[in-house]
Structures are given as C-alpha cells and as structure tokens.
Image (tube, rainbow, N blue to C red):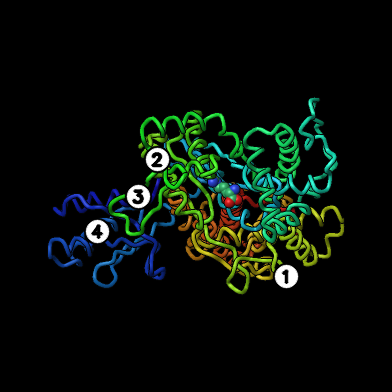
Amino acid sequence: MNLITKTEELVKEILEQNGYGIQNVVLENTSRPDLGQFQINVAMSIAKKIHCNPLNVATKIKNELNKSELFYNVNIAGAGFVNISFSNNTLIGFANEYLKDLKQAFTTDYKKKIFIDYGGANIAKALHVGHLRSADIGEALKRLTQMLGIEVVSDVHFGDIGRQSGIIISEIKRNFPDLVFFDLNFKGKYPTNIPITAKDLDVLYPIASKDAKESEERMEEVRQITSDLESGNKGYIALWNIIKKLSIKNIKKIYARINTSFDLWEGESDCYPYIPTILEHFKKNNFMYESEGAYVIDVAEEDDELKIPPLIVIKTNGSTVYGTRELATLYSRIKRFKPDEIWYVVDNRQEMYFKQVFRAAYKTGLVPKTTELKFAGFGTMNGNDGKPFKTRDGGVMQLTDLLDSVKQISLEKLNPSITNTKQREEISKKIAVSAVKFADLLPNRSTDYIFDIDKFVSLEGKTGPYLLYSVIRIKSLLNKAIAKGLSIGKIEILTGATDKDILSKLVTLNKMLNKAFYTQSVNDIAEYLYNLITTYNKFYSENNILNEQNIKLRDSWLALSQLIYNISKSLIEILGMEIPEKM
Ligand code: ARG
C-alpha cells in the first residue's frame, strides 16, 4: 500500500467528481508541520485556470477527505492550501507492513538496466581525494539501484593508458636501466616480477612527473615511451602489465577500505580490440574528417549557446586519445551489456568532454537513441581556502593519507572504556569511513564542499558518527529489552506526539528513494536518514521507553524502535557505511 499514491488518487477522484476535470495532484511535504503532515496545493492552480475561488475547491477536498478513516484533521490554511494528516491507525498499519517486510519500501516501477561508470582510478598514480567522491557517490547509487531491484552493472574504468605509463616507465628505466624490458634485442621470455612494490610506485611517480613538467627533454622521453608502448614495444608492454597488476592490487585494497567494489574492473585499454572497428565506421560514413593533421568528429548543434568544439579521435601523431577510448568503450558496453542507461559519475570539470562524447556517440550511431547517456557530475572537495583540498605543503592529498588521518582522530576520540586494541582499530576505521562518506554524500552532488575533519568526525551535528552512535543506541535499547525477556512485536498504539512524527516520515521513504534514483541524488537519502534519526532521538529523550508503565505503549515503542533501526541500517548500507558493534 503506497499511502502517497493512494491519497493523490483519492483527491483526483474528488476533483473529477466535482467537475474540475483530470488534474495532476501531488502530496507535498508540509511547510506548516503544526497544521498537518502533508499538504496539497492543487486548489490554487485550478482556481487560476478556471477563475474560481480556490477556497471552494479546497473545501470540497477537505470535506471528502475528512469522511475517510485514513485521515485525521484535514484542514485549510491561507488561500486554499489543504493540510493533510494520516490517522494513527493508518500510520500504524503502514508501519507494521514495513516492520513485517521492509522490502516493500524498496520498490520501483523502473524495469530497465543501468550501467554505472565510477571510480576511475589511474594505474601507477596514487588515488587522490578527487577519486573519493566518484567512489562514494557511484557506490551509493549502485547500492540504491540494487536495493530497488534494478539490474545494474558497475565498472571502475581504470585509467590504464596514456601519459602516466610513459612517466612511470621512464622513471623505472632511470633507476634500473639493466632490466631486460629495456633491451631491444631481448628475445627470451620476460620476467613477471620487478624489484618494485606498489608503495615504490607512489614514490617514483611524483618524482618523474615533476621532472617531466620541468624539463622538455624528459617530457619528450615520456612521450616517446608512451607512444612506443601504444604501438607495441614488447618490453614496455611486459613491464606495463606488471605495473598494472601491482597497482590494481593496491587500488582494490583502497577501494575496499571505503567499501567500494565493482562488477567489472576494466580499464580504458580494454577497448583496444574495438578501436579499428569504430575508426573504420567513422571513416566509411564520413563522420570524421581531417583537421590540422588530426581527425575529429563535429558535435556542434545549431542552437548551442556555447560553441562546442569537435571531438578529437586521432591526434596529429596518429595515436588515439581519451575520447577515442571512451567511444570504443561505449561501443563495447552496448554490445556486451545492452544497458538502457549509462551513468558517468565523474568530476564536473569533465562535463564538456562528456557532452562531446555523448553527441559523437549518438551521431555516429555507436549508441542507439534508446540508450540514455547521463553525466552524473560532482563538485570538488575544497580546503578552507575554497580551493581543491591539498596537503599542508600544497601537494595533492592522497586518499590513503586522508583516510589514515581521519582514522587517527577517530581513534583518539574513541570511548576509552573500549580497551581491546584490535577492536579499537576496527571501530575507528568504521567511524572514519562514516565521517568521510557522510560528509561527501550530504551536499548535493553537483556542489563543492569544504572538507573539515573536526566537524565531520564530531558526534554532534549532521555527521556520520552521530548517525552510527544513534543507531547503536537503538540497538542497545532493543538488546536490553530482549535481555529483560520482552519480545519485539507490532506497533499497536501511539501517543500521537513525536512517535507519530516518526511514522509520518516513513510515508515518504519509498518516494524519496525513487527520486534519489531518478535524479542520481543520494544526498536525498543522507538528508532523510539524518531527519529520521533526529526525530527518533527526540522521541528517545522524551520518553523512558523501557520503564513505560503502559505495557501496550512500551511494546509499541519497542516495535517502532526496531523499525527505525531496520530502516536506518538499510539506508546506512546504501550510503556505504558500516555500523560498529559499539562506540
Ligand atoms: N580516470 C579518469 C580521471 O582520473 C576518470 C575516468 C572517468 N570515466 C570515464 N569513463 N572517462 O580523471
């Protein structure tokens, strides 16, 4: 039973029966919680259309709804806003359904297949904070989609080709010039190991990258190696494959720390087999043409306000680029998975590039018009100065360093009564992940936000640790009840105060989840979870649940607590956080 749809349908019927025709009715969140739980504003729009008094329309709705047992105290405010509240019985019945089977809250009419591209870590380069948001948002979207029962395929889309390969290989060549990978006359079998660890890569890469930026000579060497690798230098290929393996193993560990994993761990280079096919297709159909020695595809459209430049597919030196690989990857994804939608959870700064890619993909027919390509861009995590978050010395902040420092702070703040060192480690890891993730997911994805460790790890305020703490407290209440020999059953009565407020929030859960899915905005879930928990906490502090003398009320409150625990747990899981046993 979906109470929202049911109410909207009822109001539609009332309007139709009273001669107002078929109207679009939306049950909205109230702006006057003192007057009702929800609000319907359709009277105003009807009055405008047919020039009548909105109060007349509102009165019809009010009188009819008040006849139904579903509602309680339907009233009119102002010019014709209808305030609606559900009766205790309605809310109790609804809540008990969720208590019996919470899956009912996680349903959708959407029946298609989604492919999500997120993560986007680059091989041989350390993950930096810029990769955090893609992982957090993408993982939450994937989990939400799965929870709603929608088919989804996720891919990390490693950056495993391009200049970084040249940079790292050139540095290894300097340090170990005698390795057989660099011997052009080598005819044997290449070794599968190198005297380098994943940690070494993190050190070697910045050194070489800095040098290449400062010296044109070094940059030229890097370009040459990159180009040789792409055009088939066997030694470089063998070496790059070893680096890739090392690096991927390390990257997987970091993703695991933030509870992120993928169905496909593919990279840009996996599209290589498809490149000749798409280039041939572009050539044959005159989609690409030569421009100043390069090959490009026009993507501009007549009514563009801003001029959109053509997408380069072959550079002047004959090699392919990021965009070429993007198109070939798209071709492969469509061919192999036939998704109805492909979502890209990528930094806003790549928006223009994706616009070019999407247009080129549709124009050339690589992607059918029936497949929707969506750019789910996100804003930057900034430092206090409002610029992208940096280390103290101005360098790019590595993700592992950030996670380590948040974990350290969480550990120092952890309840001293927890003494087992291993347990302290485990708990503070979970708290740190919740602090970082919740802060990352709470702002609307397209806006920037300021990273403030002290605020994020705080137990007070809109934070991950506050949520975990609250949920653990509910669990402990339930455990105490069970230890007292009580059993958790159904909700039977309410006092009609804060307990009712909590239940009225549940009515919108399903709608909220669907909106988050359709608009790729998991911040709605973060916001909802926070509101639900704060309302529950208010209720918790107002009542002494276990000592309530009215047994029926006490048991109803325990059941209500169980339900809030179940819902919070599911939402926390969608957001990619984990609940420690205690904290
Ligand atoms: N590796 C890229 C980066 O670090 C992100 C990849 C985004 N996904 C894509 N399909 N291009 O910027």
Spatial CA span between label 3 and label 1 = 43 Å
* Residue 579 visible from this viewpoint: no
Q: Is residue 535 above or below residue 373?
A: below
Residue under numbered circle 4: 61
Asked whether 455 or 485 is in front, the reply is: 455
Q: Amino acid at mark 1?
A: Arg
Q: Earlier in the sequence, mark 4 or mark 1?
A: 4
Kindly identify the residue that appears in the image at 73 percent across and 43 percent down: 247
Q: Which residue is mark 1?
A: 392
- Vertical order, 214 against 452 (above or below): above
Residue 21 in the image: x percent, y percent? 16, 51
Q: Earlier in the sequence, mark 2 or mark 1?
A: 2
Residue for point 37% across, 51% down: 4
The N terminus appears in which quarter of the rendering?
top left
The Cα–Cα distance between marks 4 and 2, rounded to whole angstroms, is 63 Å
Residue 289: image tag = 2
Q: Which residue is mark 3?
A: 300
Q: CA distance from mark 2 to mark 1?
A: 47 Å
Residue 74 higher or lower than 200, as above or below: below
Q: Between label 2 and label 1, give the one nearer the viewer.
A: 2
Contact check, label 3 and label 2, Cβ < 8 Å: no
Ligand 1 under 8 Å from disc 3 Cβ: no
Return the disc, 3 or 4, that comes first in the chain's sequence: 4
